[in-house]
Image (tube, helix red, strand yellow):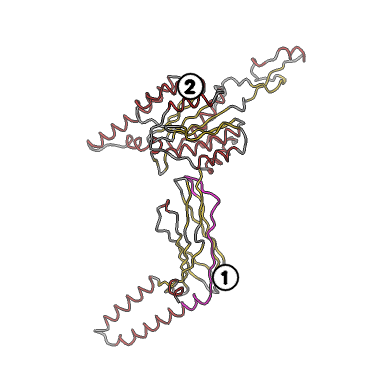
Amino acid sequence: MIKFIKSLYVTPRFFYALAILAALFLMSYWYNLLYGWLWIAVLGLCLLVLIEISMLFSKNGLKGERILPEKFSNSDLNPVLIRLKNSYGHKIEIAIVDELPVQFQKRDFFKTITINGNEKTTFQYEVLPVERGEYHFGNVNCFVSAFFNLVRKRYTFSQSQMVKVYPSFIQMKKYDFLAIDNRKSHFGLKKIRRIGHTMEFEQIKEYVRGDDARTVNWKATAKQGKLMANQFQDEKMQPIYSIIDSGRVMKMPFEGLKLVDYAINSTLAFSNIALKKKDKVGVINFSNKLRSLLPAQAKKTYLNTILEMLYNLDTQFLDSDYGVLQSLVRRKITQRSLLMLYTNFEHISSLQRQMPYLQAIAKKHVLVVIFFENSELKSLAETTASNTAEIVDQTIAQQFAFDKKVMLRALQSRGIQAILTSPKDLTVNTINKYLEIKARGLL
């Protein structure tokens, strides 16, 4: 009996009917003829309710399950499937309330679908996580009503499920495809004109028109009696490290995602492409001290190791110590490497304090400092001011934007490669810089 009562719900239509009857009973005070007919209407309403209850509770007529992917991709839309089977012999209407993880902060999930008798259906919706970690789903509550839609029976499925949210592997796969596709410029990835060539010898071949005359091999030419040329290939197996600053400056959120999460998503996509290019990739995470280090390797399966490391990475409310980073690079990275440093500077003085360490690192390695535009201030600077207060705000925003460009030039003037990018364009700009460095043979 208790189970029956807990699973029985009345619908808004039932309350609307009661409200109408109450109003008519009030009118019957002046129109006595209505009074008798209204009691017949009340009995009719009760009869309809009993009929619908008997239809819904005669058997266990609904089966369902929530189908979740093995893992979610951070900052991407991820599908969630709900599969339902109607075992009743008649059409039913189902109101679905899914208990979403607390991270989504969504408590108004409500979907209504209709299923014919003895049929199956699949309902899909999408979720957008913006934090890595474990997401716990609760019950799938289905409220079933029949013809009259006066009462509902509640069914509960998939009582508890957990999904881990990993760095954006969807973004990684997208740029993996673009890396081998000729249309990559359509998505913002620019083609880099090759300047000279790398010095990794591949073979001697017959010279054809258009080959670089400087590659002619005169000894082979004399031996073969025809022009022969050396052919070179991109130098491979070069160590490339993604260095992620997890200090407090990387906790700043833009469009719901923290800067460190943008850096993590970019690191995953960039590392995947570097592995495809036969280079060795590694990851360093530091703040006031070394948090974690993965030495550079070229194994294809190494991407899974990187993914697991990035899954647990988070920002710290501490100032980052670049002296620790410079000491770490000197001791742990002995071979000349490409270092992609994801960090942020909001003021020129903060860059000046770290400049000696960055210059020391850049003496032995190719260092690329990647820092971020403040897209919110940039939008403010581009708006039209209408009063004095807005003019002041706009002037300050323009000054901050100008300071960012000054910092970019300061790094470049000291021989340090640098990228100033908006958070949403981070991955594209990072891959472009990597392709440019490879094409120019700077490493």
What quarter of the picture does the N terminus occupy? Answer: bottom left
Q: Magenta stretch? A: 52-77
Q: Earlier in the sequence, mark 2 or mark 1?
A: 1
Across and down, in percent, residue 97 comes to 45, 62
Residue 90 falls within the magenta-colored stretch: no
Residue 369 located left or right of residue 307: left
Q: Amino acid at mark 2?
A: Ala
In terms of secondary structure, where does tag 1 sit? Answer: loop
The crowd level at tag 1 (other Cα within 10 Å; few <14, some 14-19, many 20+) is: some
The crowd level at tag 2 (other Cα within 10 Å; few <14, some 14-19, many 20+) is: many
Residue 46 located left or right of residue 25: right
Q: Mark 2 to mark 1: distance in Å?
A: 69 Å
**Residue 362, labelled with which disc?**
2
In percent of the image, x 45 and y 59: which residue is there?
A: 99
Residue position marked by numbered label 1 in the rendering: 118
Choose between 156 and 87: the one closer to the eye: 156
What quarter of the picture does the C terminus occupy? Answer: top right
In terms of secondary structure, where does tag 2 sit? Answer: helix
Considering only vertical position in the picture, is 169 above or below 411? below
Across and down, in percent, residue 407 comes to 38, 25
Residue 19 located left or right of residue 298: left
Choose between 403 and 328: the one closer to the eye: 328
